Image (cartoon, rainbow, N blue to C red):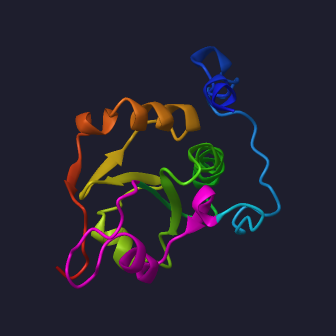
Amino acid sequence: MFAALVLGSPKIADVGEDMNPHPPFEEPEDMWAENKSLPLEWTVMELTDELYDKLITSRWLGQNLSAIPWVLVFVNKENIDSKRAVLQYKDLAHFYEGKVRFAWVDRGKAELLAETFSVSQLPATYLVKNGMAYNYRLWTYAGDLHDYIENEGYFKSTLSFNQPARFH
């Protein structure tokens, strides 16, 4: 499965006449639905302010609640790039089988959480690991993000900060 992730990433030569490097996009009917046929840990789940406080960081104490790294992607559900990111991350979540957790955050519904991460453009991807948050600014392709995680590219992130606790 991993080979398909890497090989599926578009190359510079694959751009169309409009210079858009993305492959044609067709939104699946169940784009934002939870895949109940897989364990939740193998999916890209919706993350709300409250779930962030329960699964990742305690809102009141600022404590890291998860020893497992999390990839958070802040999205606008109507934006095509946000949709592409979530679809790519679904493949990667299945590949990692819960060793890295994935979640999408609706920027409009989880405004406080988005502001906590200083989200200014969408989609915005963050890796939360070992008490730190790293802003991932590369293409939202599964192969690229996999390399970023596995090769510890986050240590070269131009934007990293202590894992946000909303009221700490």
Q: Residue 4: where, in percent of width, then height?
A: 69, 28
Q: How many marks?
A: 0
Query: Residue at image x 76%, y 37%?
Result: 24
Q: Is residue 77 visible in the rendered structure shown here?
A: no
Query: Residue at image x 63%, y 25%?
Result: 10
Q: Is residue 11 above or below residue 154?
A: above
Image-based side of 3 in relation to 165, left or right? right
Nearer to the camera, 76 or 146: 146
Image-based side of 98 in relation to 110, left or right? right
Quadrant of the drawing holding the N terminus: top right
Query: Residue at image x 66%, y 50%?
Result: 87
Q: Residue furthest top?
A: 13
Q: Is residue 126 above or below residue 146?
A: below
Quarter where residue 68 is shown: bottom left
Image-based side of 76 in relation to 68, left or right? right
Nearer to the camera, 161 or 15: 161
| Magenta stretch: includes residue 74 | no
Nearer to the camera, 39 or 112: 39
* Numbered range of the magenta stretch: 40-69
Q: Residue 149: where, in percent of width, then height?
A: 41, 38
Query: Residue at image x 38%, y 41%?
Result: 137
Q: Residue furthest right?
A: 29
Image-based side of 71 in relation to 160, left or right? right
Q: Residue 60: where, in percent of width, then height?
A: 23, 85
Quadrant of the drawing holding the C terminus: bottom left
Q: Is residue 149 visible in the rendered structure shown here?
A: yes
Q: Residue 75: where, in percent of width, then height?
A: 52, 61
